[in-house]
Amino acid sequence: MKIESVDVYVCKFNRHYKIRGVQEAPGLIEPTDYYFEPHWCQIYSRKMETCLIKLTTDNGLTGWGEAQAPVLPGIAGSIIHELLGPFLLGRDPLQHEVIYHQMFHMMEVRGHGNSFFHDAIAAIDIALWDLKGKHYNAPISELLGGPFTLELPAYVSGLRQPTLEDQANAAKEYVSQGFQGIKLLLGHGLDRDVQIVETIRKAIGMQAELYVDLLWKYSLAEIIRLEQELAPLNVGFMEAPMSPNDLPSHRTLAQRTKIPIALGEPFRTVHEMAPWIESRAAHVIQPDVARCGITSLMRIAELARTHYMKVAPHSGIGSCIGMAATLQVSASMPHFLIQEFQLDMFDEHRKMMEEPLQIANGKFVVPQSPGLGIRVKESYIAENAASHWSIRSNK
């Protein structure tokens, strides 16, 4: 079996993520769709952007992958189009460990050990695992030695309703549907953050999980003050509290906080994640499969397990392909904690699949069909592709 073609889709779906729950984009950079939210330094898009790939073999099998790139997905796509895609032609997809090793080191000496280059690698790695599962007629979770469970408890990530009262009512409804908890997107200032958490905790009760994402917003002194206010509210973890470049402050915080610290979204490789795990600068590790790939994520997860840390895989702005890959890896971990669920994008996910991912009583049902376990609607993806490259051998 050999890889015969590589198709790259740079997609821009007409769906606004609405991180604040409103449609406006006040910090828009003309003439792009990219804008700054008022409370955060990160940039977002008015569309749901991602890079998807399809690998096709000479015996007709197809494997799908995703590079989680909510901004500038064309960069990951170009890397695949101009370099990694041609590199794959004629390769045996079952030799995915060899392929991953070669891609990993291809640009390492030039300083490209992170960011878009590894996002592109992640997309390919997921697609290779999808092909492997289809070849062996088994879901990826089985190939990884699992699954430990076929139902993954989930929390709703972010409340998109425009007012705090609306958010409280929605959070109460989500918990009543069986979701294990809610994660709030904070960073509005310490006093406002405390008010938001108090309001949502009151709405959902003390038994439901309540997590907070601080979007790398605060200093160590500010986080220490905030943690003292939030600890009595039974917050399950504080995600991304400070700059992802500030390992020493995270280590200090992790040693003194009553609330577990969660992080890992920006890191693609076990080499990046190792200092944080080995110095115990966090308690919960959150790698993203559409940035790491399955191979790299499982290496990170295994290192976390040797340090008795839980893993709660990050699932950000992306498609059903990255979500399906996330479910497969989550099911294969004995130290899995809980699954992030971007409810606001789930309708878009459904449009991309022949049969939607299943949620029962607030839990994800892990697909048991071969590979990723889903059937992708390529026609819908093509309709929403800003760019499409098809890479084939000239031979």
Image (cartoon, rainbow, N blue to C red):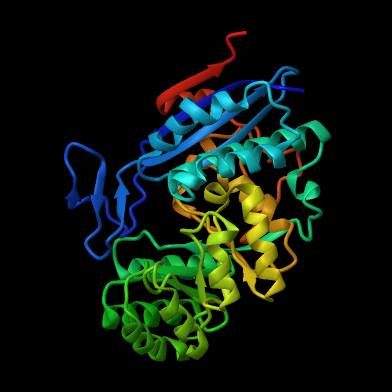
- Kindly indicate the quadrant of the structure image that contains residue 97: top right
**Quadrant (top left, top right, bottom left, bottom right) of the C terminus:** top right
The N terminus sits in image quarter: top right
Whether 53 is drawn above or below 357: the answer is above
- Front one among 89 and 14: 89
In the rendered image, which quarter is residue 130 located in? top right
Q: Looking at this view, name the residue that lies furthest to the front.
A: 109
Q: Is residue 305 above or below residue 67?
A: below
Residue 266 x/y as whole percent: 46, 58
Q: Position of residue 350 (x, y in %)?
A: 54, 39
Question: Does the rendering let one see residue 336?
Answer: no
Determine whether, in the image, residue 265 is placed left or right of residue 374: left
| Residue at figure coordinates x 65%, y 23% from the top left | 56
Q: Image point 47% across, 42% down: which residue?
A: 117
Q: Position of residue 8 (x, y in %)?
A: 50, 27
Percent position (x, y) of residue 314?
Answer: 53, 59
Q: Is residue 300 depicted above or below 209 in this figure?
A: above
User: What is the total number of numbered labels drawn onto the structure image?
Assistant: 0
> Closer to the camera, 33 or 124?
124
Q: Residue furthest top?
A: 395
Vertical position of residue 190 compared to residue 323: above or below = below
Residue appearing at x 76%, y 44% in the figure: 368
In this orientation, does residue 246 appear? Answer: yes
